[in-house]
Amino acid sequence: MKKKIAPILSLAFMIVLSSCGNSGNTGAVTEKAIASPAQNAAQEPAAYDPKRGEGKFDETNVKLEAPDAARAGQGKAIAQTKCFSCHKTTTEKLVGPGWKGVTERRAPHWILNFITNPDPMIDKDPQVQAQLELCLVRMPNQNLSEDEARSILEFMRQNDGAK
C-alpha cells in the first residue's frame, strides 16, 4: 500500500509546484494584492507614519476646541461600557495601560486612529508593539463610530485636565 501512495504524492507535489510558477508580472501583482496589511507594511515600512498612525484621522480633520463637558460625559459612559474592563483613568496598568496623560503623549488624530482602527496599528506601530509586549493582550476592535471615538477622546482630554 505504501508503494502505491508514494508515486501519487510525488505526482501531486509536482502538480502543485508547476501551478505555482511565475507567468510574468501578473503573478507578482496577485501576490501583493492578496498579502495581508501586515505583510505589506513589512515590505513598505517607510509608508507608516508613527506620529499619525493608520486610519482616516490626521491634522486636517481633527481640530481640538475648548473642552466640552457634555461630550466628555458621553465619552465616559461609552468608556465605562467598552474600555474600563481593561483601562483605568490613572497611570496604573490594568490589562491595558492607564489613560492618565495619554493626550499629552499622543496626538489627538493618533488616538482616534488607534481606538477606531487598532489592528493595523498594533501590527505596524513600534510603540504600540512595545506596549503589547508589556500588556501581552491585543486591544480588541470595539467598532467605535467616529462620534463615539471623538467622545472618548474628549473624556481623555478631561481626564488629563485639558483647559
Image (cartoon, rainbow, N blue to C red):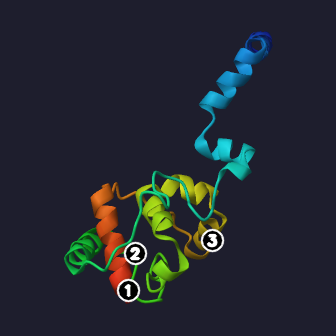
Which residue occupies the foreground of this view, 48 or 81? 48
Residue 20 seen in the current view:
no
CA gap between label 2 and label 3 equals 16 Å
Q: Position of residue 96 (x, y in %)?
A: 47, 75
Q: Which residue is mark 3?
A: 133
Q: Residue at x 32, y 56 (%)?
A: 146
| Lateral position of residue 122 relative to residue 116, left or right | right
Q: Position of residue 113 (x, y in %)?
A: 47, 59
SS category of the residue bearing label 1: loop
State the quadrant of the C terminus. bottom left
The answer to which quarter of the image holds residue 129 is bottom right
Foreground mark, 1 or 3, reads 1
Residue at the left extreme? 70
Q: Is residue 145 above or below residue 96?
A: above
Q: Earlier in the sequence, mark 2 or mark 1?
A: 2
Which residue occupies the foreground of this view, 16 or 159? 159
Residue 26 seen in the current view:
yes
CA gap between label 1 and label 3 equals 30 Å
Q: Is residue 53 above or below residue 27?
A: below
Q: Position of residue 4 (x, y in %)?
A: 76, 10
Foreground mark, 2 or 1, reads 1
As shown in the figure, which amino acid type bears the numbered disc 3?
Glu
Q: Residue at x 49, y 61 (%)?
A: 59
Q: Residue at x 67, y 49 (%)?
A: 47
Tell me, yes or no, whether the two marked residues, 2 and 3, touch with CB atoms within 8 Å: no
Q: Label 2 neighbourhood size at 10 Å, few (<14), some (14-19), many (20+)?
A: some
As shown in the figure, which amino acid type bears the numbered disc 2?
Cys
| Lateral position of residue 161 relative to residue 31, left or right | left
Q: Which residue is mark 2?
A: 86
CA gap between label 2 and label 1 equals 23 Å
Q: Earlier in the sequence, mark 2 or mark 3?
A: 2
Q: Which residue is mark 1?
A: 162
